[in-house]
Image (spheres, helix red, strand yellow):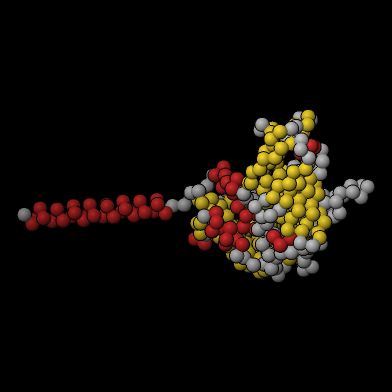
Amino acid sequence: MNTNFKKLGVLFLLIITFVSCDNGDDNNSENLVLPPTAATFKSISEQGVKKNTQKFTITAGTGVVTITSAKGVKLNINGDCLTKNGVAVTGAVDIEYIELFDKGTMLITNKPTMGITAEGKKNLLISGGEFFIKATQGGVELKTSCSMNLIVPTALTDGLDNAMTLWNGTIDEKGELAWKENKPNADGTGGGKGGVQGEGANYYVTFGNFGWTNVDRFYSDPRPKTTLLVAAPTGYDNNNSAVYLSYDGEGNNALAKLDTYTPAGLFSEHYGQIPIGLKCHVIFATESNGQWRYAIKAVTVAANDVYTFTLAETTVGTEAQLVAAINAIQ
């Protein structure tokens, strides 16, 4: 009898041990974080773009039409100048419009303010607003033979800055946006400073093409410059995550991005444009089950710094929470 009880006791302990181990494995699987695919990571930025797209309908063939955006920007389009496949159009035209004024929204749409220098490098731009405009009729993109203009309240980006000029957005083969400065025409026309004139409480912006347009100036700092490297958490790279920089003291209207990735698996600012001694925040961002996973690290830049993020440092939050966290950086 005692032997039977002992056998039953041992069997009971084995069952308890097995169940405990099994539950432990379940908990581990629940806590396991799998990095997103490249397509999934790209899609969360595309969702940000979609949420920030405003849609309007105008009538072509009735002269200049004025659209007022959610932020109070006025867009003037001459409907008489719109063409489809080279032929003038009339009737209803669909307008898609995006306006970005803060670095939080720039991040969740992946539209940083990185300008291409005369040497082909990239440097941070301070923005008076990033804008995208697209006109279609029946799903076909239209062109314009006339200039368009924007009236942009300077209060949206820390007030009037007379150094601002016009920049055109270029999208590379990876879908990344960078900015090229628009130059006035050889005869001196082109709307003042490359298409931007600041007066009173507004920027008056003149440009001739649909697509991405920006009111900007280069960030300037006299201190010696350096490069820097950033290591993402294990399993994350430039296909399923991104690293951005927010410069302290530059307000909410500027966001840099580390746009290269080294063979050693590090995000890189390889242009040597980062001031030594700069106080800034390094931002790691990726996707996690339909939400954003991110980490923000305050640093003071030293020569050839390498910053490392671990998964334990990251937070999962909604798009709104990420935007608020980024815009809280000052």
In the image, is residue 153 above or below residue 65? below
Q: Residue furthest right?
A: 187
**Number of marks in the rendered image:** 0
Q: Depth check: 233 or 113 in front?
A: 113
Q: Depth check: 167 or 289 in front?
A: 167
Q: Depth check: 183 or 56 in front?
A: 56
Residue 275 location, quadrant: bottom right
Name which residue lies at 78% across and 31% down.
88
Q: Residue furthest left?
A: 1
Residue 140 location, quadrant: top right
Task: Give the x, y percent position of residue 114.
Answer: 72, 54
| Residue 239 at least partly seen | no
In the image, is residue 277 above or below residue 287? below
Name which residue lies at 82% across and 41% down.
146
Name which residue lies at 77% across and 33% down.
83
| Residue 198 at least partly seen | yes
- Name the image quarter holding the N terminus: bottom left
Q: Depth check: 131 or 62 in front?
A: 62
Name which residue lies at 78% across and 45% down.
148
- Name the image quarter holding the C terminus: bottom right
Side of 104 where 64 appears, left or right = right
Task: Give the x, y percent position of residue 23.
Answer: 31, 53
